[in-house]
Amino acid sequence: MTRKSGPQHYPGADRTHWYQNRWPGDAMEVNVVVLHTTEGRTLPDYNGGRMAPNLTAVPDLTAQKLTWYQHFDIDVSSRALVNLPGGVETNTLNVCQAELVGTCDPVTHGKWTDAGRAHLYWPQAPEWALRELARFLAWMHQEHDVPLSGPELWPPYPKSFGSRAGQRMSGHEWNAFNGVCGHTHVPENDHGDPGAIDFDGLIRFAKAALDV
């Protein structure tokens, strides 16, 4: 599918870290959002964009909002997933990828807390952060028809690493999937992010945002 429809830039997103000109992707019609966590506290440079998602959300803990940076058009493939030769497509299979600055690892969370390093631990994300992320998902539903639904299993990290918790999709399941999932669900990948994010709450807030 080569056409692109719907708005290609998330309203208010900063495009000063734009990588599409350097790393052109494939045109597609998005029907999936994949959520990642960066496992860091600041906006990554993604190796000059070589491994960048479509968007990154940076928490402003003082203002209690997410600052969004967009790196690729919504309907252009980005580069944050592993794609093995000879298997299913990942980055290019109608996927918009969003990285959430912060961590899903309780060990990292503990270390940063002990060191006094301000950060967002996504499995215990405050309501404001979930509502900010939910507004993005509501927009993706409204403008790009991404279903506000997803997998039942969102295991905590490190259980979510690999396929030990039974959450990782098969190639067939991935090809048939429409909706919102995590890096932890994507085949050919072993990462466990975003861990046990409150997915039910996130979808509830997204649906509420549509009713405003």
Image (spheres, rainbow, N blue to C red):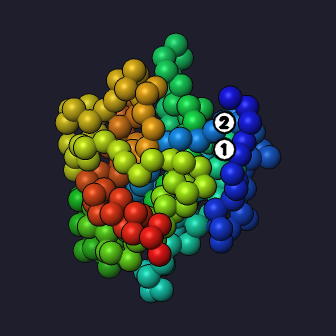
Residue 20 left/right relative to 133: right
Instruction: Pick the residue in front: 17 or 89.
Output: 89
Measuring 80% from the left and 46% from the top, which residue is drawn there? 21
Give the label on residue 40, or none.
none
Residue 75 appears in view: yes
The total number of labels drawn is 2
Residue lying at the far front in this picture: please name it. 211
Which residue position holds label 1?
75
Which of marks 1 and 2 precedes in the sequence?
2
Height in image: 175 above or below 25?
Answer: above
Query: Picture coordinates of residue 159 (x, y %)?
Result: 20, 43
* Mark 2 secondary-structure assignment: loop
Q: Amino acid at mark 1?
A: Asp
* Mark 1 secondary-structure assignment: loop
Residue lying at the far bottom in this picture: please name it. 62
Residue lying at the far right in this picture: please name it. 21
Query: Picture coordinates of residue 117 (x, y %)?
Result: 37, 75
Residue 72 appears in view: no
Give the label on residue 28, or none.
2
For disc 1, the neighbor class at 10 Å (few under 14, some 14 to 19, many from 20) is many
Measuring 39% from the left and 20% from the top, which residue is drawn there? 172
